[in-house]
Image (tube, rainbow, N blue to C red):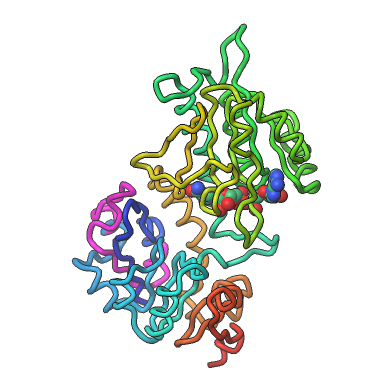
Amino acid sequence: MKIGCPTEIKPQEFRVGMTPDAAREAVNHGHEVLIQSGAGIGAGFTDEDYVAAGAKMIGTAEEVFAQADMIVKVKEPQAVERKMLREGQLLFTYLHLAPDPEQTVDLLKSGCTAIAYETVTDDRGGLPLLAPMSEVAGRLAPQVGAYTLQKANGGRGVLMGGVPGVAPAKVVVIGGGVVGTHAAKIAAGMGADVTVLDRSLPRLRYLDDVYGGTFKNQYSTAGATADLVREADMVIGAVLIPGAAAPKLVSRAQLSEMKPGAVLVDVAIDQGGCFETSRATTHADPIYEVDGIMHYCVANMPGAVARTSTQALGNATLPFLLNLANKGWKQACEDDPHLLNGLNVHAGQLTYYAVGKALGIDVISPSLALKS
Ligand SMILES: NC(=O)c1ccc[n+]([C@@H]2O[C@H](COP(=O)([O-])OP(=O)(O)OC[C@H]3O[C@@H](n4cnc5c(N)ncnc54)[C@H](O)[C@@H]3O)[C@@H](O)[C@H]2O)c1
């Protein structure tokens, strides 16, 4: 198969769909890998790295799209890219179609087959191609929060780990899923005094079993949250209610009870945020203040560490990518129902129920698409 990887063109996107390592694996499986020249620069991969891996460098996105059987990307195709997709071409990338009618219509019109990273599943009920980005955002949260806590950045001037004789920072993590667990691990590793709140008892049992000696956990009620937030130097928002906007768990009124210069890091901002005063910010201007409390609410946190994020995403996508290339999408999806769950669009028809429901477009079952 000819696998094409164009340069990402969405503003502030520095990741790339294939690492040189992924390119090498695909080449070793007998595929031809076409990388747009410069595609890896933002993530620290040079054209020479790709050439050494056996890939062929291509001058323009137009040529990549024209030649490739499968396009591998990170972000959803932008309008100009959607025009380059063609009937029968396979697209493997994040799509997030439900809130995006324009993209959905364009993909349907193109006649391509599109598999969305975010809806591929695993047998533990997880989302294996979203998890790596949650791991990155979770681990980044205490790092950006610690920087924001510094006096010159508007924070309380508290060191995460304290020093001998001085207490460490108190960190509260609301939501103990993928983001929350990774955030708590890193905050505890920095020496902070960490408590994780969650509403799922099985999850709390897991956290207690595995991390009981590293950080505390508590059942998430409004009362417990209010008590912990009042005492906190840093609060990390990491809740998720699948398919719904994040619940607002800290109100504006509560900010006045907090310590001046305390920091809120709202990782859940991509689902609307879990603090009433959260509004999405960008890496160019990530921090703002409300009622003396510092807020960090960047909606695409993994972009800050594009190299790590590209490698983490590449590790997760590679086995699926190889199956798609080795077997063709139909056989690969027939053999793996979790990959089939990723199928969103095929030959002008939607194949993902939740997207159809959100956009009022008819849907055919993915298994019917396999037979077409
Ligand atoms: N800003 C970014 O760049 C970025 C990057 C990755 C993920 N995210 C977002 O981070 C959020 C968390 O993602 P995740 O992968 O950890 O999800 P997850 O499903 O693994 O974990 C969410 C956890 O929240 C818990 N929860 C739900 N309601 C709660 C409540 N009221 N109180 C306490 N806990 C509650 C759930 O029980 C679950 O354990 C999502 O909104 C995700 O989209 C943002």
Instruction: Look at the image and give the residue range highlighted in magenta.
Output: 24-50
The residue shown at (56%, 25%) is 190
Query: Against 221, is 355 above or below?
Result: below
| Count of number-bearing discs | 0
Q: Is residue 177 left or right of residue 46?
A: right
The quadrant in which residue 19 appears is bottom left
Residue located farthest toward the bottom when viewing the structure as drawn: 372
Residue 259 image position (x, y, % from top left): 59, 22
The residue shown at (59%, 77%) is 357
Residue located farthest toward the front when viewing the structure as drawn: 253
The residue shown at (37%, 72%) is 71
Residue 78 image position (x, y, % from top left): 34, 68
Q: Does residue 321 show up?
A: no
Quarter placement of the N terminus = bottom left
The residue shown at (41%, 79%) is 107
Query: Which of the two residues, 368 or 288, is positioned nearer the viewer here?
Result: 288
Residue 77 image position (x, y, % from top left): 37, 68
Query: Against 75, is 204 above or below?
Result: above
Query: Which of the two residues, 199 or 273, is positioned nearer the viewer here?
Result: 273
Query: Against 234, is 340 above or below?
Result: below
Indicate whether residue 58 is drawn in magenta.
no
Query: Which of the two residues, 146 or 178, is positioned nearer the viewer here?
Result: 146
Residue located farthest toward the top when viewing the structure as drawn: 165
Indicate whether residue 39 is drawn in magenta.
yes
Q: Does residue 246 show up?
A: yes
